[in-house]
Amino acid sequence: MRDVESLKLLRGRLEQARQRWRWLEAFKLFIWLLLGMLMVFLSLQLLHYLVWPLAKPLLSSLSLLLLGLILIILKVFIRSPSLLKVASLADVQFQLYEQSSTALELLEKPQLTTSPLLRQAILAKAENLVSEIKVAELFVFKWPKSSYALLVLVPLSLLSLFLPQAKSMNISQASQESLLLNEVERLDLSQQLGQTAELLKEEAEASQDPYLQALAQAFQELGSKLERGELSKADLELELNRLMRHLDKAYQPQGQASDQGQQAQASNQSSAANPSQDDEALADGHQKSHREESGGENRATLGVLLEQLSKNQQDLKASQESREASKGMITIDREKYASPMTPEAYDALKDILADDSQKSAEIVGAAQESSAGEGDVAGEGSESLEGAASLMAKQALAADQEMLLPSLSLEGGEVIKVERPPQMNLSQVTDDNPLAKPSWQGAQETELRHDWVLPRDRALLSRYFTREKLPQE
Amino acid sequence: MLHEGLGERLERLAQVRQEIAKVVAGQQEAIDQLLVSLLSGGHVLIEGAPGLGKTLLVRTLAKVCGLDFARIQFTPDLMPADITGTIALMQDEDGKTRSRFQKGPIFAQMVLADEINRATPKTQSALLEAMQEQTVTAVGQVMKLPEPFFVLATQNPIELEGTYILPEAQIDRFLFKVNIAYPSAEVLNAILEMTTGSLQVEPKQMLSAEGILDFQRLTRDVPIASHVRQAVVKFILATQPESSPLAEVKRYVRFGISPRGAQALILAAKAHALLQGRYNVSFEDLAKTLLPALRHRFQLNFEGEAEGVSAEGILVKLFETNRAIS
């Protein structure tokens, strides 16, 4: 019975001491953890600011802190000293001559001695030892020296939270923003487009102008697509740009159009053909004057809307430029995927695509009217499509499809870019065309893909025809 | 004494120390070491210059402990039979002459083998065999030596000419090797005062043979905590040149401490704890008994001897290192 009491007393005191050790150890480890966490946080902040936008530094560091806390708790409980170890530490600290550790062991292992006299004497002494073991003196609390580093790291970390956002971060955010429109922007713009379409429709009905009808329909469709969220900013900008050019042409004074000569006239006619998908109705140049004469009250409203749309278009262009700038950050990727189509060429091509739609429209118009030689306006090295153009027209080209774009001088020879409806192959064009020159008969369809081109842009660049051998003219 | 409590017994031990100290001045450490050997049941090799009171110390101890005492002066012509005994023709009560075994001085409870290194190895072996087996074989009979049997051998470290140095295997059989140090001025003054006057102090008997045997049993019952024993194991292994982490041991030590040495250390520490009034072995007990128990079992190699390396220094260093680790 006395053994049990002695055991309780001694074990209780030693358990208290162990508990204190755990707290002190946990505190010490926590300070180190805090130091490590702050250093990681600052490093991540620095990397984030200078090099590359990584995962969120604060979140990463807090995760690290949480993980560290769990590990500390596990370590403190799993690796805490045994009671025997605590007792032997107490023996050293209070000069107990291994009496407490021996007593504890004797209580747990009675076979340590066969002498009942010695056993009783040791246990009797163990009770006295309890009062000699002072827990606070056994494990003295000392403020860890490592904590002084916190005085520097904590203010630094707090300051880093108020740093201006990194350049890379700004660009990244801008890039993200440029790709998608927010809800308010989307609805607002689609509403504007719908209103514009309504006004154009009224005006088209009043003037019986199919060109304006086609434009109204195109605006209406654009608004619907935008409302459904099917367009990115870049796509919207391209489409809006195109429609606005057509709108400019629709309201261009007749005299100015006449001054530009026959070619310009053909161009206007073909431009009108695109939005309306009605080639035959667009050939009539008289309707322009009719548009000039028509107007009315709707005109003023339309002017305001167009002004707003024009402003939106500028905003979109600005965001597109920002996105292009962010793409410029990925210099390494461009080099990695270097191909005959260089980034500069790509940019040049994009500019041409955006600004030269008029030329392509001319080709369509010219092709419709002429049988041979009229389409050779695409640039040096291109071949006349001759009868192919009319054949393409028969294949029900989409209204917004650009037919032929200028060739580009690229490494490895001339490349002629032809865009055509998705269902059509070049072989269909050339094989069925009796007027096509023999050198084109063997032309192969080659699809080029550039990984550095964004997926949505690939559609514009996807179809190329290369001549294996330049024809000897 | 057997019916005394533990406290009284330890008190009696303290009185034994005081009683011896009354006669032998300034040799408290040597007295403690002899008592530890006595309680452990081991034999002692005493080394010291002539005239330092070795014989007086042993004689006083025997008297205080109430043990039969015999002194054998070892000389080169001493024969084994001179120690163990021999067949002698003796007349019985009827006047007839008969051969009878005459017991030698070894049959005393406490034997002082004075200048053991002066006898031939053959004679030394006879004594050492009796120490180990605690029996003597003569004329085909095995005779048990009395209990407790306690041999104290002395040797003079300065007169080595014409001596036979004890081999390591035989030295290992001594529990302790006690070095009697030259007394300080203060002690010397006390010795002169005590021994040159007309008043001679006679020590009282404080123990008996049974009491000593009881103490020897109690000593073996003293518990030692497992971490302390583990520290001893580590320390003993660290004295081996093959497994020692200390470069000095690898370089200078010929052979380390044997398991018998480890037994001696722990047993001596237990006795020392009792002598200090404690019931368990502490590191302090081990430290106090370290050198007397192990100094004669730890041999340096030629390089160590040549460079004057201190074997005791290495032992202490090893022990402190292991103690700190544990």
Image (cartoon, grey):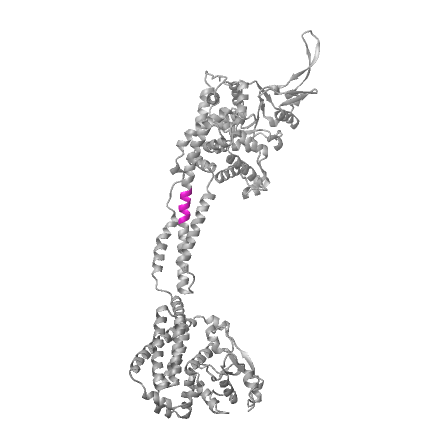
* Viewer-proximal residue among A436 and B205: A436
Q: Is residue A418 above or below residue B39?
A: below
Give how far across and how far down residue A404 sits, in percent: 48, 84
Quarter location, residue B299: top right
Please say whether residue B111 is one of the residues in the magenta stretch. Answer: no
Left-right relation of B251 to A303: right
Left-right relation of B293 to B88: left
Q: Is residue B271 above or below residue A319?
A: above
Magenta segment's dominant SS is helix
* Viewer-proximal residue among A39 and B9: A39
Quarter location, residue A19: top left
Q: Is residue B277 visible?
A: no
Residue at image point 50% right, 87% down: A389
**Magenta stretch in the rendered image:** A22-30
Give how far across and how far down residue A206 sits, in percent: 34, 85
Q: Is residue B227 visible?
A: yes
Give how far across and how far down residue A20 sits, in percent: 40, 40
